[in-house]
Image (cartoon, helix red, strand yellow):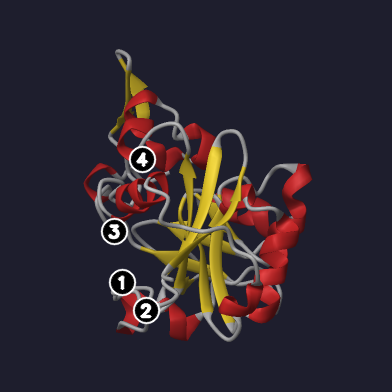
Amino acid sequence: MNGFLLHEDSQRVIIATGFSTPSDNRKTGDMIQVWILVKAVSPTEAIRTGLDRLICGNCVHRGHEENGRFGVERTCYVNPGQAPQGVWKAWKAGNYPLLRSLECFTGRKVRFGAYGDPIHIPLSLALAIAGVASGHTGYTHQWRKPSLQGWKTLLMASVDSVAQLVIARSLGWSTFRVGSEASAGESLCASDRDGTPCAICLLCAGARGGLESVHIPPHGKGATHFIEA
């Protein structure tokens, strides 16, 4: 079985894939990929209608609304019409059984949020998965919310400026920032530095081992629309 349903609520479904077929993502390497998806419509339709707010919250990389069109000048690196669309269609077809045991995560590397914000996973479940996995990565744009501070041990605060970086670190978050140049104290993403995949680096694992700040230049599908904050 290559994928499982981890959790669902009235608006979202959370799927993990990559158990039997290794990921071919050269940047991340072989990691179990966790997808947070809108239940009612496909990922591309969610962006077109603005319903992607249900999984991405206030992330600036969603793009903006213009004359009733959502997702204008989107800067997110994910191409929703590829892997997210495929995972959503497979879920709709009933191809992902409910996860019954965490055993399949034991000793594996996990990418929380291959698409969507991981804070929609029950925190207790995410902590349990991280506890049996051999490493993980993850990011959230919702790091300012008081109710979500428990996530700082698992996720990086996805910040959009050096000013936000300073605030996030003062709250105890490790940070990850997209920008044209690194600021003092930021490490260049190892994938960009020398091609080291996330599965080997694992620096983006929250604040468990101390505060880290990682920087990466604009990349992926939305890089052409990126504007420095």
Number of other residues with Cα within 10 Å of mark 1, as a class: few under 14, some 14 to 19, many 20 or more: few
* Residue at image location 35% in from the left, 76% down from the top: 21
Q: Are marks 1 and 2 in contact (CB under 8 Å)?
A: yes
Q: Tag 3 or tag 2, which sits nearer the N-term? A: 2
Who is closer to the viewer here, 92 or 111?
92
* Residue at image location 72% in from the left, 70% down from the top: 128
Secondary element type, mark 1 = loop
Query: Where's residue 80, x and y in %?
Result: 31, 46
Query: Where's residue 163, x and y in %?
Result: 57, 49
- Residue at mark 1 to residue at mark 4: CA–CA distance: 19 Å
Residue that label 3 marks: 219
Q: Tag 3 or tag 1, which sits nearer the N-term? A: 1
* Residue at image location 41% in from the left, 71% down from the top: 18
Badge 4 amino acid: Pro
Which numbered mark, 1 or 3, is in the foreground of this view?
1
Q: Tag 4 or tag 1, which sits nearer the N-term? A: 1
- Residue at mark 1 to residue at mark 2: CA–CA distance: 6 Å
Indicate the quadrant where residue 28 lies: bottom left
Query: Where's residue 164, x and y in %?
Result: 58, 49
Residue that label 4 marks: 43
